Every structure is written in structure tokens, then in C-alpha cells.
Image (cartoon, helix red, strand yellow):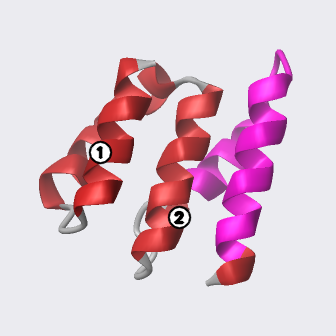
């Protein structure tokens, strides 16, 4: 879990700082939205919010409907508001 969470944070920080993010990196974050750990899911949401949440609105919306963890839902709301 720790490595996957750290990977999400690193990818989000890096992708948010560059102009033309690699789609493969964003795909990794999208896959992390279905991780069994809410810590990983929440940090994947944060990272996608750094990239550009409108590109991932459908995936984030689907997760928001099924997510049990309140803080992950809150993170989704924050990402979609960016």
C-alpha cells in the first residue's frame, strides 16, 4: 500500500507540473482508483485532480457513487472542483 500511495503522490506532483503529461501515467492513476486500499484510491484521486479532473470526470464520478470512505468522496469533490 505505501509504495502505491507514494507512487500516486509522485505521479500527481510530476504530472501537475508539466504541460503535456504522458497518457500512460494517467492510466496508471485511473487503475489505482479501483485499488482495495482507500488510502491508494484517495491519493489517486488527488493525483488525477492535479492532472486535470475534467479529463477524468466520468471515472471520478463513478467512484464517487460507489465509494464507502468519506474522505475519499471528499477528495473526489475537491478534485472535481479544481
Tell me where the magenta segment starts and ends, as one range. Answer: 4-30
Residue at image point 62% right, 31% down: 50
What secondary structure is found at the residue carrying circle 1? helix
In magenta segment, residue 80: no
Q: Residue 60's x, y, as percent?
A: 34, 42
Rendered position, 20 above or below 10? above
Per the rendering, the mark at residue 32 is 2
Q: Quadrant of residue 21?
A: top right
Asked if disc 2 and disc 1 are in contact, CB closer than 8 Å, the reply is no
What secondary structure is found at the residue carrying circle 2? helix
Left or right position of 2 against 11: left
Q: Quadrant of residue 3?
A: bottom right
**Residue on which disc 1 sits:** 74
Whether residue 33 is visible to the viewer of this picture, yes or no, is: yes
Q: Quadrant of residue 74?
A: top left
Q: Closest to the observer: 27 or 15?
A: 15
Q: Residue 81's x, y, as percent?
A: 36, 20
Residue at image point 71% right, 37% down: 23
Left or right position of 23 against 19: left
Mark 2 or mark 1, which is nearer to you?
A: 1
Mark-to-mark CA distance, 2 and 1 = 17 Å
In magenta segment, residue 7: yes
Total tally of numbered discs in the picture: 2
Per the rendering, the mark at residue 37 is none
Residue at image point 78% right, 40% down: 13
Whether residue 59 is visible to the viewer of this picture, yes or no, is: no
Q: Main secondary structure of the magenta part?
A: helix
**Which label's residue is closer to the chain start, 2 or 1?**
2
Residue at image point 67% right, 58% down: 8
- Tell me if mark 2 has few (under 14), some (14-19) or many (20+) residues whose alpha carbon lies within 10 angstroms of its own: many
- Tell me if mark 1 has few (under 14), some (14-19) or many (20+) residues whose alpha carbon lies within 10 angstroms of its own: some
Left or right position of 15 against 79: right
Amino acid at each position: 500500500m505505501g509504495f502505491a500511495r507514494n507512487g500516486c503522490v509522485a505521479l500527481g506532483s510530476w504530472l501537475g507540473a508539466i504541460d503535456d503529461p504522458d497518457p500512460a501515467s494517467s492510466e496508471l492513476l485511473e487503475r489505482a482508483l479501483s485499488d482495495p486500499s482507500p488510502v491508494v484510491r484517495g491519493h489517486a484521486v488527488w493525483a488525477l485532480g492535479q492532472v486535470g479532473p475534467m479529463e477524468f470526470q466520468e471515472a471520478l464520478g463513478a467512484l464517487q457513487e460507489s465509494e464507502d470512505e468519506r474522505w475519499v468522496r471528499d477528495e473526489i469533490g475537491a478534485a472535481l472542483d479544481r
